[in-house]
Image (tube, grey):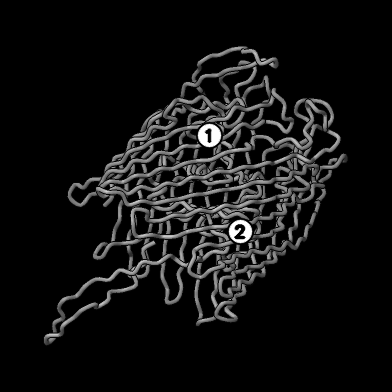
Amino acid sequence: MLLTFGWVLAQSEVEGDSITNLNEVVVRATKPYAEVIPAQTLKGEQIESLNSHSVADAIRYFSGVQIKDYGGVGGIKTVDIRSMGTNHMGVFYDGIQLGNAQNGQIDLGKFSLDNIEEISLFNGQKSEIFQPARDFGSAGTIYLRTRRPQFDEGESTNVKAVFRTGSFGLVNPSILVEHQLSNSISLSANIEYINANGKYKFRYKKYLSDGSLAWDTTATRQNGDIESLRLEAGLFGRLNGGRWNLKAYFYDSEKGIPGAIVNNVWKTAQRQWDRNFFTQGSYMQRFGDKYELMVNAKYARDYMHYLNPDTTMMYIDNEFWQDEIYLSVANKYTILKDWDVNLSVDYQWNTLDATLHNFAYPTRNSLLVALATAYKWRGLKGQASLLGTFVNDRSTANISTGSVTRLTKSHEELTPALFLSYQPIDDVPFNLRAFYKRIFRMPTFNDLYYTDIGNVNLNPEYVTLYNIGAQYAANFNGLLRRVLIKADAYYNHVTDKIIAVPKGTGQYRWMMMNIGKVKIRGIDVNAQASFNLPCDIALDLNMNYTYQKAQDYSDPTDNDSYAGTYKGQIAYIPWHSGSTIVHGAWRDLELNYSFIYVGERYHNSANIPANYEQPWYTHDISGSYRFKFNKVRLTATVEVNNLFNQNYEVIQNYPMPGRNYKFILKFEL
């Protein structure tokens, strides 16, 4: 990173009031190592250069990440990091967690990149003690930071309009307007519309148990259409020693759910309607040199309607309404120059309503209290935290007499975490790091109360995390401009894992149980390099590799040599995976190449040939050209995804698109 510390008067002659012979001196240095456990980060132009539309598409390029993608423009996309399960990941939008008390999963496909300034992924937790208690409560966290208005001198309004079209019948316009209301207050408004038929051709092969080919056919994916509207507005303010912001978000969509291709069924009629709204605000203020205050608040209302009209399977027509209220206060105090402490208190209220018969109508009150400290001594940095979680659930139950009774269930837990980083030599940008964390996640409302499936006696699902790693990062003045190499080895132990098990007879009789146990061993490696080549060519490389051995230890008796699940690699977790990004720029022209590889895996913990899933990989390329027309800055981009038309599935029986195209035109004023 280039740090320009100032203008230095190297030689000067004073003649009256004039100064002559003024030379510029640029000082270059390596940015000090700021975080105990650094994040994986994509920001600004990096995000724009990727062949990605949603947040889930961009996160695929982080190490240790598995994306469950059911295909299509509007297909559901959830993230699993280091094989701990989607529900153990916290997703934060401008510093406040996105919630889903119903099933604990955040569909990252709903969040566009048009308004995102930075995406950060932390293993364990964010390396910052001045944060809400909720931030301490996940095994891993993803932070989405939206764009904060910035204005050139003499300007008070920014406008950015983007239009995308291409394969799948895609029509995707968006517009962002930013306006400076005063010297300290600015406004941002963003609207995006997506319409696509979601149709794409795919090749489908089916093999018999003996390995022989049953059929090989080409078909068109149906019922993958989507129509959605996203609206966001924000107010941003600066104070003397502080800042504040208010944000409102609305998302409305209707989409088809293509469904799995099984039993020679190529089209389904399932539909889903989503309507999500939240408004949130944050206030931060420094008082003197010792004390800082942060207050966050949020209200969210989510609606989901799911329809499966196919009576040959099971007719389902369910509606759900979720409400959430969240309040947080964080207090940081500086005891000494290199010693800070923080006390955070959060309160969260969740409720769920549904059209299900004999539904429990649950309400959850959660209180989280986090005490954390951070200390620095020479090359050693440390953070420690203790999180207290106090949860109270209330629900209704219909008993045999037909009367209704009120059930109450409470849970209390203390969970610690410790993070350390050490730089052995002051002048060498090499760091060692390690962390330990014990955390849990409460069962979701579906786990506990879904009619005929939920189990009110479930315990929380626990995870213990261990991590050791190293990092080298340095900047140079020659052909090689920057280099970063980091590696981590980790061990995660998941106990009381909540899984669905058969209950009696019948295809749809299941119950949630605490019988799962998973042991995860892995290695993440990331290497980055930036070059200044001749002829004003800039080149950036980013490579990630992950090895994971994630084994199912749930049932020691299920150890049959052929079909047993004990010690089997858990479903959809590859042993090897990785990605590469190459970005080149020359004047107003940019080229980007990205490659993703997911190795062999199984769709069941029984690692037998019938459950085997082939490795898959994709190559994507894009080219952009920037030019000006009067005061308008324009960028034209062409993308080709899955360049070599690979046939692959992320999830069994959900074929992904082959080669597809996208054309993007961006206007900025």
Give the total number of marks visible in the rendering. 2
Residue 409 location, x and y as percent?
A: 80, 54
Q: Residue at x 61, y 42 (%)?
A: 547
x, y (%) of residue 633? 25, 49
Chain-order first, disc 1 or disc 2: 1
Asked if residue 58 lies left or right of residue 25, the reply is right
Q: Is residue 452 among the parts visible in the rendering? A: no
Confirm whether residue 416 shows in the render: yes
Residue positioned most to the right: 401
Q: Mark 1 points at which residue?
A: 75
Looking at the picture, tell me which residue is in the foreground, 581 or 181: 581
Point out residue 119 in the picture as x, y percentages from the top left corner.
48, 52
Find residue 8 and report its image quarter. Answer: bottom left
Q: What residue type is labelled 1?
A: Gly
Q: Which amino acid does label 2 sit on?
A: Gln
For the residues labelled 1 and 2, the Cα–Cα distance comes to 28 Å
**Residue at 83% from the left image edge and 26% from the top image edge:** 505
Secondary structure beneath disc 1?
loop
